Structures are given as structure tokens and as C-alpha cells.
Image: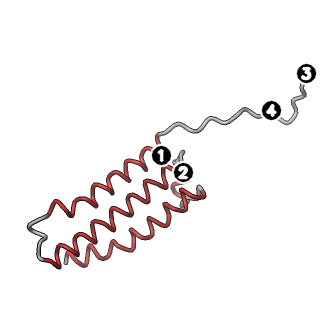
Amino acid sequence: MMAWLMGSFMPFGVVAIVRGVAAFRTGWMIAPARRSVRRPRVYGVGVVMAGTGVLVAGATYFALAEAGALSDHPWFALVGNGVELAGIAFIAASRWAPRPVRAARPSRGAHPTA
């Protein structure tokens, strides 16, 4: 049962990594995230970390379960969960960070008076 559960989350990790790379490289995000994310690159790093955490947790689970050492080293499987939580922290930071300051542009109807 646990192998089925861990294996079903692996494609979600791959999709998250692809989404994170797209956000980091181009600033593109899925529609629900566009309004609330203020720093797309930080968001991209966080999504890549969260996806990597899912893949690492699944891979270590399968490696340890195959070797029969899952009960001997359960903390090793938690490394992926730590990476995933760090990614979630980056995603949260991308929403809380202040918007970048842009240079003021003159309005369309303004004429220089110098």
C-alpha cells in the first residue's frame, strides 16, 4: 500500500520541477499563482525544491524498502521531506516579499517644463 502511495506522487514531483524551471527561467506560472506571487524566480526555486523533495522522498523510500533497511534508517527517508518543506518556505517567501521597485514613468500627457 505504501509503495503505491509513494509511487503515485513521483509524477507530481516531475511536473512540479518542470513548472518551477518555467517560473524561474521565464516568469511563467500557473493561473492561480499569478495574482499572489510577487517574486516569480523565488517561486520557481521553491517549486523546484518541493518537487525535488517529493522525488527524493520517494526514491529513498523505494531504495530502503528494497534493501530491507526502512525500519533501520527511517530518518534517511525524511531528507526529502525536509527539502520539500524548504521549498514550501520559498514559495511562501515569494508571496510575502515586497514588490520590486520600478522607476517612475512620466504620464502620457505630461510635458517637460525645463
Give residue 66's position: percent from left, percent from top.
Answer: 17, 79
Q: Which callout, 1 or 3, points at the residue further toward the start of the chain?
A: 1
Which quarter of the image is occupied by the N terminus?
A: bottom left
Q: Which callout, 3 or 2, points at the residue further toward the start of the chain?
A: 2
Q: Is residue 104 above or below residue 52?
A: above
Q: Is residue 75 above or below residue 107?
A: below
Which quarter of the image is occupied by the C terminus?
A: top right
Q: Label 4, label 2: how many angstroms apart (C-alpha)?
A: 27 Å
Q: Amino acid at mark 1?
A: Ser
Tell whether label 2 touches label 1 (CB within 8 Å).
yes
Judging by the rendered image, the residue that carries numbered circle 3 is 113
Q: Amino acid at mark 3?
A: Thr
Local SS, label 3: loop
Q: Label 3, label 4: how many angstroms apart (C-alpha)?
A: 13 Å
Q: Which callout, 3 or 4, points at the residue further toward the start of the chain?
A: 4
Is 66 left, or right, of 21 in this rendering?
left
Judging by the rendered image, the residue that carries numbered circle 2 is 40
Judging by the rendered image, the residue that carries numbered circle 1 is 94
Q: Label 3, label 2: how many angstroms apart (C-alpha)?
A: 39 Å
Local SS, label 2: helix
